[in-house]
């Protein structure tokens, strides 16, 4: 019997299954029955879609007419399994895409935020591409463990990203019935307990004073003075500044919550100067086009320019200003419960992290080294 050697390669950006055999009309006729079977001049062999279903089809199709040699294929599959796969070239099936679209509509109907929907869909696409040869209903809890080990850990992705994937998988499979997945048994990664990055008051002042541009100065100052997230600042409108009551109204922030933050008299005066100079129309801080919010990347660039001017060599991000605000409030004696409300934290445990970076009480501790 004629021997057919199986192999797998990337051809035209896709993983394909190669079938190598001497010229034989009968084998060629059978090969053409495989999905999207074509002849490759590059590899001098026939190729078809690579999937477990096609492999089973090959085995059945040539059972009585040829000997299948899969040694090369098995060797390559073993190498692929030990390395983290590149999923960028894999295209999801129409059925999977339809499932994801239904899941998106389900989240929209429950008013999940655009950010959450986008994050969950992106995470699910990666996970389902990893198991593109499996039906969604056949994916099991063991497959999640394999994905964590052979994709997440192999690519050295963060525990935060892994947690996002777990959240997406859990929610997705809770909306489905008759699957091998038990969403309640999917475990979460043990998260690192990292301290928030905090600047000294002197460093914050230097960063805020670095810009002469009134808009740049006002944006950075408002982030620090009210403990804002970047997106919260860019969503503000002039009517959200209540100068009579000295409060800032933050609408529909993380978790779709409204909250208020106290406004410093100094920041109110700065915002008045800014408003007179720039005359915003819709948003408090607008980009080059009137009526459009300031760009987040441009705001990051504003901070980067401040750091260059002040010669601060720390990898400071905009969120450092929010962390610094919370820590400085705590050091000034503000009750933790008020800080939680101002920052918009759902849980007090989130706010308690700032007690670990506050130096107010730690600085009072006398080292035994001083007594030597």
Image: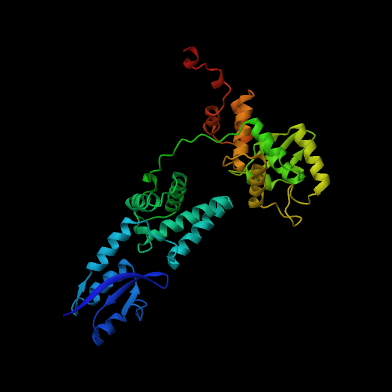
In this picture, is 149 found above or below 257? below
Q: Which one is nearer the viewer's eye here, 79 or 130? A: 79
How far from the left and from the top, in percent, is residue 107? 53, 53
In this picture, is 61 found above or below 238? below
How far from the left and from the top, in percent, is residue 120? 49, 53
Q: Which residue is drawn at 40% across and 39% down?
A: 190
Name, please, the residue furthest toward the right. 276
How many labels sit on residues?
Answer: 0
User: Looking at the rendering, in which quadrant would you find the N terminus?
Assistant: bottom left
Q: Which residue is drawn at 44% across and 57% down?
A: 126
How far from the left and from the top, in percent, is residue 39? 34, 81
How is the rendered protein coloured? rainbow
Q: Which one is nearer the viewer's eye here, 37 or 83? A: 83
Q: Can residue 260 be seen in this view?
A: no
How far from the left and from the top, in percent, is residue 218? 73, 42
Q: In which quarter of the image is residue 92?
A: bottom left
Q: Residue at x 75, y 36 (%)?
A: 267
Q: Residue at x 29, y 62 (%)?
A: 77
In this picture, is 206 found above or below 336? below
Q: Can residue 137 be seen in this view?
A: yes
Q: Quadrant of residue 55?
A: bottom left
Relative placement, left or right, of 60 versus 215 is left
């Amino acid at each position: 019997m004629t021997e057919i050697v199986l192999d797998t390669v990337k051809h035209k950006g896709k993983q394909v299954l190669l079938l190598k055999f001497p010229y034989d009309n009968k084998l060629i006729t059978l090969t053409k029955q495989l999905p999207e079977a074509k002849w490759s001049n590059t590899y001098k062999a026939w190729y078809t879609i690579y999937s477990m279903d096609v492999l089973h089809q090959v085995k059945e199709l040539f059972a009585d007419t040829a000997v299948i040699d899969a040694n090369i294929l098995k060797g390559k599959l073993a190498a692929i399994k030990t390395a983290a796969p590149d999923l960028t070239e894999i295209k999801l099936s129409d059925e999977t895409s339809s499932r994801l679209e239904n899941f998106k509509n389900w989240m929209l109907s429950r008013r999940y935020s655009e950010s959450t929907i986008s994050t969950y869909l992106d995470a699910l696409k990666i996970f389902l591409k990893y198991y593109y040869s499996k039906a969604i209903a056949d994916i099991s809890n063991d497959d999640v463990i394999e994905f964590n080990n052979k994709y997440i850990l192999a690519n050295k992705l963060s525990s935060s990203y892994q947690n996002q994937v777990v959240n997406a998988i859990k929610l997705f499979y809770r909306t489905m019935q008759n699957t091998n997945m038990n969403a309640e048994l999917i475990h979460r990664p043990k998260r690192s307990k990292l301290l928030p990055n905090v600047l000294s008051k002197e460093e914050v002042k230097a960063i805020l004073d670095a810009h002469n541009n009134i808009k740049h100065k006002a944006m950075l100052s408002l982030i620090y003075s009210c403990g804002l997230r970047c997106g919260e600042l860019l969503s503000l409108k002039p009517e959200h500044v209540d100068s009579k009551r000295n409060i800032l109204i933050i609408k529909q922030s993380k978790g779709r919550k409204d909250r208020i933050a106290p406004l410093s008299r100094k920041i109110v005066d700065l915002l008045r100067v800014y408003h007179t100079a720039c005359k915003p129309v819709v948003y408090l801080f607008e980009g080059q086009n009137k009526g459009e919010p300031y760009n987040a990347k441009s705001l990051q660039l504003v901070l980067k320019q401040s750091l260059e001017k002040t010669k601060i060599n720390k990898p400071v991000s905009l969120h450092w200003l929010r962390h610094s605000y919370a820590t400085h409030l705590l050091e000034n004696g503000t009750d933790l419960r008020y800080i939680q409300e101002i920052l918009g934290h759902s849980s007090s445990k989130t706010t308690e992290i700032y007690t670990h970076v506050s130096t107010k009480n730690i600085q009072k501790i006398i080292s035994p080294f001083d007594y030597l």
